[in-house]
Image (cartoon, rainbow, N blue to C red):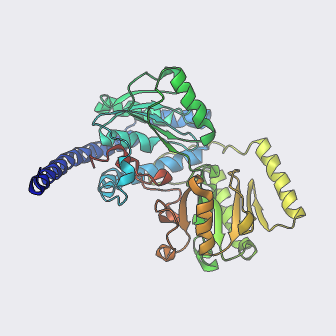
Amino acid sequence: MDKSARSKSHQSGSNEAYELGKDWSKQAKERAFLLQEHLIKWFDDEQSGMQEAIQQSISGTDFTSEDIYFQLSAIKSRLEAGDLVHWIHQSRHVKDNQRYKEFRLTEQSNILCIHAGNLPLVGLQDALAVLIAGHCYTGKISRKDPFLLPSILGWLARQGWGAQIHHWTIESVKLPAKNYQMVLFAGSESSLANLQKTLVRVGKIDEQTPWLNRLASFSIAYCPSKEAVLEQSSELIEALIRHGGKGCRSVGVVVSPIGLNELRIPLEHAMKKALEQTNSLEQTNSANLTNPEIPSQGTNRSESTSLTYKKAYNIAVDRVFIGVGDWLIEEHPFEYVPLPTNSLVVYWVKANQEALMSLAERFGSALQSIYYVGINASDVKKPYKHTFDIESIDSAQRPPLYWKPDGIDILRYLCPFII
């Protein structure tokens, strides 16, 4: 084939791919519009089953009622803002296209979603991405959050999404054996290997089935000045303590050129205020959800005992720390700051931006996001990994529905040639 023939062939293939992608993108938009409409109705329709799922979650899970209502309010507000449609526009402008071409999915592939349960409805994003992309969903629901997501899935199936929503279950052995083109996993790395072996052993998947694993466990906040902390102390504390600090978007490490001692009084005040508001359960939210007076669930005895020992140890080694309720903020030197493993303990590092980037590299895949406390987030240099965006601390616990777990746009990942 001569050069002109190859050029015409390439041009023809490009045009065909463009038209095909344009058509699929249009279909994805239509699905996103419809999905937004049906999800908002789940919140508003008294017969949707939402209130029953809320009450079951309050009485049958470790989530506090305040955290459940907070999460639902945040999700509804993002739906009303049009996040699902915006997600498609955003996904088309992903710069790093190569990482999203690892797996070639065909239209209406069978996708198995294994959901985490550390936060209420934390698995919703994966389910929505599968539906918007036009694939078929099967879900392994977490035992820690077994009511809210199934309520939404059942509602959507009744609204006409049954052709895409194939099955969901809490029990791994009850998953249907199918030709899954991909498994989406979000959760703890410690449970991943055993789960993979179990699913292969019981014949639900084979060893060649590709997995996309999201394993990040905490985020970092950067506070450039004392003034920035004073201006956004409530936002910073919420990023630390919301959902018991258990989410990957929860702040586990704070980096600042200001030492913890200089901020002790405003941070203690902000923590006390936040914990009082949480315990009172008198939240008014934008979702118009009724918040019943149900006692907040506290920390278990082993965690409280551990924190008591930590406080005593901090005093013994003359470490600067703040202790309010069940929470600790400890100051650690940059060289020795450990990987956060206790959701109730936050590490404060007195250091500059260069140290922030070094910590991002040191923590690697365990790190989810980097937040900026203050109004000039663009002043922070980009970290070594392109997958990290510098986000405002405001968005830590109220992310858009298209946020990127482990830096991955899951919608873009599921349809690299569709969006």
Q: Residue at x 58, y 75 (%)?
A: 231
Evaluate whether residue 40 shows in this view: yes
Front in this rendered view, residue 49 or 201: 201
203 is higher (above) or lower (below) than 280: above
Q: Residue at x 37, y 42 (%)?
A: 103
Which percent across, then down, holds residue 198?
56, 25
Furthest-front residue in this view: 2
Which percent across, then down, holds residue 54?
52, 37
234 is higher (above) or lower (below) than 257: above
Q: Residue at x 70, y 62 (%)?
A: 347
Evaluate whether residue 122 shows in this view: no
Which percent across, then down, holds residue 342?
71, 50
Taking the image as shown, residue 357 lies to the left or right of residue 318, namely left
Quarter where residue 27 is shown? top left
Quarter where residue 351 is shown? bottom right
Q: Residue at x 38, y 39 (%)?
A: 42
247 is higher (above) or lower (below) than 174: below
